[in-house]
Image (cartoon, grey):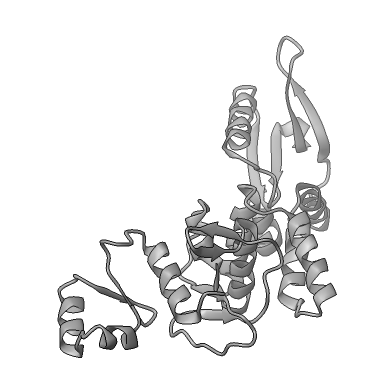
Amino acid sequence: MLTREMRMRGVSKGIKASRIACGIWQERLGVVVIPECVTSTDLRDAWALALRIGKRAIITGPTAARIQGRPIDSDLILAISPVQRHARVPGARLLRREPLFPTRRCGSLRLTNPEEAILDTLEALSVRDVREAQRLLDTALQLRWITPRFIESALILRHKRGQHVRALARLHSLARGGTQSHAERQMRKLLYKNKFYGWKGNHRVDDANGRAIASIDFAKVDLLIAIEVDGHAFHSDRQAFERDRVRDSDLAVAGWLVLRFTWQKITKESQWVVQRV
């Protein structure tokens, strides 16, 4: 309930303060919430935002993503507010635009779809903490919560609507650059720059029966050293992750030493990669 509504219902400041102090009620984003009515923290925030902003409020960001099953680890609270209104919500950021894609319903709440909720989170994080945004982008791409193609489609829509695209364009560049093929090209440049010669790309390894164990990204055949490169979007699910680990084990049994590097390590911590090689 909003404070003015509580006064209309005869609830004094003292009663409000005592019930909040005892934990019977909670105050979120300037709205008093009764926990027994809404058990989820994200739903409490969503209802608080809807009450503060009005019926046309659209919940987005981590709150909307988590409600729809995408467990984003972020404390940001975001909502889309109609441009003509000028509501302020302490502790939350309001986006003054219309959603890019069709919204979804959760009871009487309106939410952006999970992909747009994640995109709004990434844009907001890129302003506050670029590294945190890159980590979330990496996770979102690996788990297929979002794809480079979706980011590109959002960028095109923003251009058409004449909206700001700088942060979104940067995310699009990072998402495209983090593909496995691009990561492999960066690794090849790193090997050549540091005079690590004699590495063979896409080297096939067979077992004793002639069955292919793996195709190694970069192989130092005479030393039986394998370098495997993971791009942002390479591991699309848990099964793909597990298959890679089985393959690494098979290579180890065959006598290979496997060095596995991520896109983040290759581009941001290249000296660390060089030292390991």
* Percent position of residue 176, x then y: 78, 58
* Percent position of residue 38, x then y: 33, 62
The part of the image, by quadrant, that contains residue 264 is: bottom right
| Front residue of 126 and 24 | 24
| Front residue of 256 and 148 | 148
Residue 274 seen from this side: no
| Horizontal side of residue 163 vs 271, given as left or right | right
Which residue lies at the image location 75% right of the left edge and 80% below the top edge? 164
Which residue lies at the image location 37% right of the left edge and 63% below the top edge? 41
**Extreme residue toward the top, this view:** 209
| Horizontal side of residue 151 vs 77, given as left or right | right
* Percent position of residue 263, x then y: 69, 54
* Percent position of residue 81, x then y: 58, 79
Which residue lies at the image location 71% right of the left edge and 75% below the top edge? 167
| Front residue of 225 and 175 | 175
Residue 200 seen from this side: yes
| Horizontal side of residue 137 vs 192, given as left or right | left
For residue 173, above or below residue 253: below
| Horizontal side of residue 114 vs 206, given as left or right | left
